[in-house]
């Protein structure tokens, strides 16, 4: 088990060479301040799982400690603006105190994205991230309101799969 753990840590360190300078700087700070070996798993260049043991700031308040950690290490997680890009999703005071943030784009929640912080006693011990650092802009609609109106008016009074097409009254 010790050999596997060593290989995992070495593999994570090697994988970090493809990261930005800011990510490397944060990783080095994790290694320096963590009382446990730092283990990082990357998926598509994004840190997805981080095992460590950093002293929690904010006197043991997990929510405040998570926010402070996010602000200090946002470059490592590739989060440009944690206040704008994340929202408070849930907290859980179980065996590990969990603080989960969901990802949002223009105040619209992004189902698949987020980041969770897990605290044991007064230490951050695990971070799980599915944050999506960049999304292509969504394409505009293929049809404008006039085209939709023409299609609906053409099909008015017919049925589609047993449903009658109703009158459509656009408000433009």
Image (cartoon, rainbow, N blue to C red):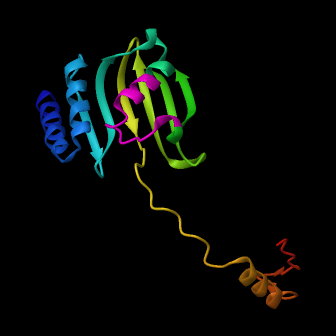
Instruction: Determine the residue positioned at 19% across, 28% down.
Output: 28
Please provide the residue range marked out in magenta. 66-83
Q: Position of residue 96 (x, y in %)?
A: 44, 20
Q: Residue 104, image x and y in percent?
A: 54, 45
Task: Report the side of 25 relative to 54 (left or right).
Answer: left
- Which residue in the rendered view is the most extreme toward the top? 59
Count of labels in the image? 0
Asked if the magenta segment contains residue 72, the reply would be yes
Residue 22 found in image quarter: top left
Is residue 60 among the parts visible in the rendering? yes
Horizontal side, residue 141 vs residue 34: left or right:
right
Horizontal side, residue 49 vs residue 168: left or right:
left
Q: Residue at x 47, y 36 (%)?
A: 82
Q: Which corner quadrant holds the N terminus?
A: top left
Is residue 95 in view from this perspective? no
Q: Residue 106: within the magenta?
A: no
């Amino acid at each position: 088990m010790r050999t596997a753990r060593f290989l995992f840590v070495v593999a994570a360190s090697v994988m970090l060479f493809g990261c930005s300078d800011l990510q490397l700087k944060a990783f080095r700070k994790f290694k320096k301040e963590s009382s446990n070996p730092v283990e990082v798993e990357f998926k598509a260049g994004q840190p997805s799982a981080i095992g460590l043991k950093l002293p929690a700031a904010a006197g043991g308040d997990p929510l405040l400690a998570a926010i402070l950690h996010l602000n200090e290490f946002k470059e490592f997680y590739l989060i440009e603006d944690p206040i704008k890009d994340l929202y408070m999703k849930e907290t859980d005071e179980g065996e590990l105190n969990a603080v989960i943030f969901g990802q949002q784009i223009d105040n619209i929640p992004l189902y698949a994205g987020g980041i969770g912080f897990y605290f044991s006693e007064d230490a951050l011990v695990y971070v799980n991230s599915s944050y999506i650092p960049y999304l292509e802009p969504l394409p505009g609609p293929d049809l404008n309101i006039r085209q939709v109106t023409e299609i609906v008016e053409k099909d008015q009074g017919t049925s589609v799969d047993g449903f009658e097409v109703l009158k459509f009254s656009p408000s433009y």
